[in-house]
Amino acid sequence: MSVAPAAPEPDVSPCTSCGACCAYSSDWPRFTLESDEEIDLIPPQFVNERQSGMRFEGERCSALTGTIGCSTACSVYAVRPQVCRDCQPGDDACTMARAARGMAPIPERPEVWGG
């Protein structure tokens, strides 16, 4: 007997069951607005060789844990780059990343999910 998955909590970010933005492009999690001090807060194993962005392993950011489209988390969430902070549930970047993985868009609800 199978059990249907529970409906997501209305105040829980859909990012925790997605991760598409973290697997969109090795050029996307780049450092652009971060100071050297902010970059230094990111553990070095997650920073690429050029020190220009996050390291990718295969087709995903090395800081992403879990299974894309099921359950994901960022192991450097508190010190993640600005490009990661700027991608919000349902915005254009989110929709583009989800489409690239064959995932349906999600509605924007920043007043509930926060950033």
Image: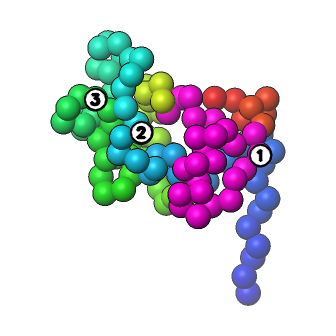
Whether residue 23 sits left or right of residue 49 in the image: it is right
Q: Earlier in the sequence, mark 1 or mark 2?
A: 2
27 magenta-colored: no
Residue under the image location 62 percent in, 61 percent down = 103
Q: Label 2's element?
A: loop
Q: How many marks?
A: 3
Q: Which residue is mark 2?
A: 28
Query: x, y (%) of residue 29?
Result: 40, 36
Question: Residue 37 location, x and y as percent?
Answer: 32, 12
Viewer-proximal residue, 60 or 75?
Answer: 60
Q: CA distance from mark 3 to mark 2?
A: 10 Å
Q: Residue at x 48, y 30 (%)?
A: 83
Task: Give amino acid for label 3.
Answer: Ser
Q: Which residue is found at the position 36% from the left and 40% from the top?
A: 27
Give the mark nearest the N terminus, 3 or 2.
Answer: 2
Q: Residues within 10 Å of mark 3 (few under 14, many from 20)?
A: some
User: What stretch of residues is rendered in magenta?
Assistant: 84-108
Does the rendering let one see residue 99? yes
Name the quarter where the C terminus is drawn: top right
- What residue is disc 1 on? 107
Identify which amino acid the numbered label 2 is placed on.
Answer: Trp
Please tell me whether mark 1 sits on a helix, a strand or a loop. Answer: loop
Q: Are marks 3 and 2 in contact (CB under 8 Å)?
A: no
Residue that numbered label 3 is attached to: 52
User: Could you tell me which secondary element the residue under label 3 belongs to?
Assistant: loop
Residue 101 x, y percent position in the rendering? 53, 61
How dense is the environment of label 2, judged by Cα within 10 Å: few (below 14), some, or many (20 and up)? some
Residue density around tag 1, few if under 14, some if 14–19, many if 20 or more, within 10 Å? few
**In x, y percent, where is residue 31?**
36, 26
Task: Check contact, mark 3 vs mark 1: CB within 8 A.
Answer: no
